[in-house]
Structures are given as C-alpha cells and as structure tokens.
Image (cartoon, grey):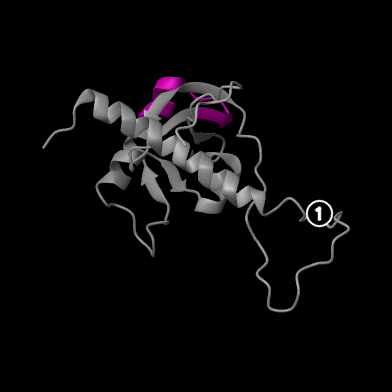
Amino acid sequence: MAMSRAARRRVRAVVPAALLCLAASLAAGCSAASGASSSPGPGPGAAVSNAPIPQPPPSGKACGNTRTGAGVPVIVKVTKGDVDCATAMRIEDSYAALVKHGALQGNGGGAPLSVSGWTCQGYPTPQVLATGAASECHTVSTELVAVLALPATSSAPSASAS
C-alpha cells in the first residue's frame, strides 16, 4: 500500500526530530564530564556515560539536499578540495542507492564502498549524533559529507497536550 503525500511528510518530520531527541538525551549525561563538578564521582559499579559531546556540523560548500539509503534527509557539503556540486550529488546519491540495495559488507554494514573512484562510508551512530555528519565520500584530494538536515527549531514554546 502506498503512503499518501501527507503521511510521507509526517514521517519525514518525525525522523529528524527523533534523532535530535536521541542526541539531546545522550548529551544530557555528559554535562559533568569535564570534572569541574563539586559533587563526588560515581560510586563503584555505577554506569559512566560515554555519550559523545555534540560538535558543530562540518562546514563546507552546501550542494543540495538528498536522502540517505535509509531515507534520512541530508545536506551534501564539499568539505575539502574542489568538486562541482553536480558530481558531489551524483556520488552521494549513488552511495545511498548502494546502501539501500544492500551492497554494504561487514557486521552492521559499516564497510567502505567504492563509488566511481570515490570511497564512501557511513559514520558510527555516536559520531552521527555528535556531529550531524552521516557519511563521507572522498578521493585523495577531495571530501564530501552528508550532514543531517534537521528542521529549524523555533524559540517559541510549543503547546502541550497534557
């Protein structure tokens, strides 16, 4: 059964929001990681969070929007070297198609893939949550990164249906 256009829009809105919520909940456990807290450390046997500290997304020339092999919206950025945006988008779209159709090898599908002379690989989830960068494709002198395209957040409080 095909999804309606409205249903697809709702799904597209929920996925980035869910990733953002997950990143925020992971980051909340890192606030005392610097050791500047005056409270004592965790007792013996206590769980210690190894969640990544959020970083700014990679900078670079934004080429356009597309989707990962899992359907997550991303912005393709050229972060190193000189490549035209049409090539960057073609490489990222080709990589996403290979991922979508199961071309990845390895436990969890994290192995690099060759795409028209480029090497592409997805980042581990903790790194994605910390930086927003989902994957990278590179040659010897050029690099492009697919960065999560999260919806802009409003500073106005939202109504709660409690």
Specify few, some or many for label 1: CA neighbours under 10 Å numbering under 14, 14-19, or 20 or more.
few
Q: Amino acid at mark 1?
A: Ser
Please report the residue visible at 59 percent of the width from the left and 21 percent of the height from the top.
156
Where residue 45 sits: x, y (%)? 68, 78
Q: Is residue 108 above or below residue 3?
A: below
Where residue 115 sits: x, y (%)? 36, 41
- Magenta region: which residues? 77-90
Q: Nearer the viewer, residue 98 or 48?
A: 48
The image quarter in which residue 82 lies: top right
Task: Please indicate whether residue 40 sits to the left or right of residue 156 in the image.
Answer: right
Q: Nearer the viewer, residue 35 or 93?
A: 35
Residue at the disc numbered 1: 34
Query: Does residue 40 belong to the magenta stretch?
Result: no
Q: Is residue 118 above or below residue 32?
A: above
Task: Please indicate whether residue 141 sits to the left or right of residue 66 in the image.
Answer: right
Residue at the front extreme?
162
Q: Quadrant of the N terminus?
A: top left
Where residue 96 sits: x, y (%)? 34, 39
